[in-house]
Image (tube, grey):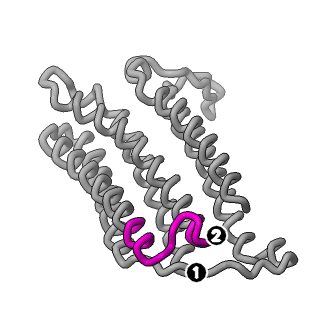
Amino acid sequence: MNIWVAFGVLSIGVIVWFLLIRKLNTRSWERHGSSVHVRSARGDVGEVEVPPARIALWVFLAVITSLFGLFISAYFIRMGHGHGAAHAISDWRSVSKPSILWVNTAMLILSSVTMQAARHAVKLNNRARVLGFLSAGGVFAVLFLGGQLIAWYQLRGAGYGLTSGPAGAFFYVLTGVHGLHLLGGLTVWLKTMIRMRRRAAELIDVRLSIELCTVYWHYLLLVWLVMFALLLST
């Protein structure tokens, strides 16, 4: 897979990410929902309020699942598996994995756990705990991103630059795309934190934001664990 093709796909992903993040940033969905008609076992028809932002998030997750799926498929093909084996691709050289990736993984796990704790605290109507866990979730995510930059620096110091070979290029692209999506989630998290700091803001006003952020964090953790296992095994 040509590196410029990879960057082209990355650019498309960033554009889609930007458009959907703008949708998630709008506040109208916290007051108005979309009605979905459902039919009960008795034949009665009712309406269930489904916030557009929740629908937008699931659509977005489907898009980025396809994006990461394409990258992972290209990764295996470029290694020489599948169709790549027929072309006798032999220039693949595995890169040494920086040990800080283990620390980064722990940071992302803690970030996901604390975001879930914040979501649970909302149900208990405990504003102090919500603010504390939500803050911790963001801090752990920032530490993860900082650790990824350190991993890039260590990898480059070991002689594996972006143009040093396909394995190194894929490492930068995969971790970079994942980091961009987490950075996008942090923008929504930051806006939620700012609103939480306002005395007039009620938990009901930010409940959906916290729920969607938590789902997004869990998803990115799952994606990272798959990618990390892939990088370690190859």
Residue 201 vs residue 106, the one in the foreground: 106
Judge whether 2 appears above or below 199 on screen.
below
3D distance between C-alphas at marks 1 and 2: 9 Å
Q: Answer yes or no: is residue 113 visible.
A: no
Judge whether 49 appears above or below 230 on screen.
above
Task: Identify the residue at image location x=42%, y=49%.
Answer: 182
* Quadrant of the image occupied by residue 39: top right
Q: What is the secondary structure assignment of the residue under circle 1?
A: loop
User: For the C terminus, which image quadrant?
Assistant: bottom right
Residue type at numbered disc 1 = Ser
* Quadrant of the image occupied by residue 84: bottom right
User: For the N terminus, which image quadrant?
Assistant: bottom right
| Residue 166 circle label | 2
Q: Is residue 69 left or right of residue 98?
A: right
Residue type at numbered disc 2 = Pro
Task: Identify the residue at image location x=82%, y=78%.
Answer: 85
Query: Which mark is first along the chain, 2 or 1?
Result: 1
What span is in magenta? 151-169
Q: Which residue is mark 1?
A: 94
Q: Is residue 62 left or right of residue 187?
A: right
Residue 53: x and y, percent? 48, 30
Q: What is the secondary structure assignment of the residue under circle 2?
A: helix
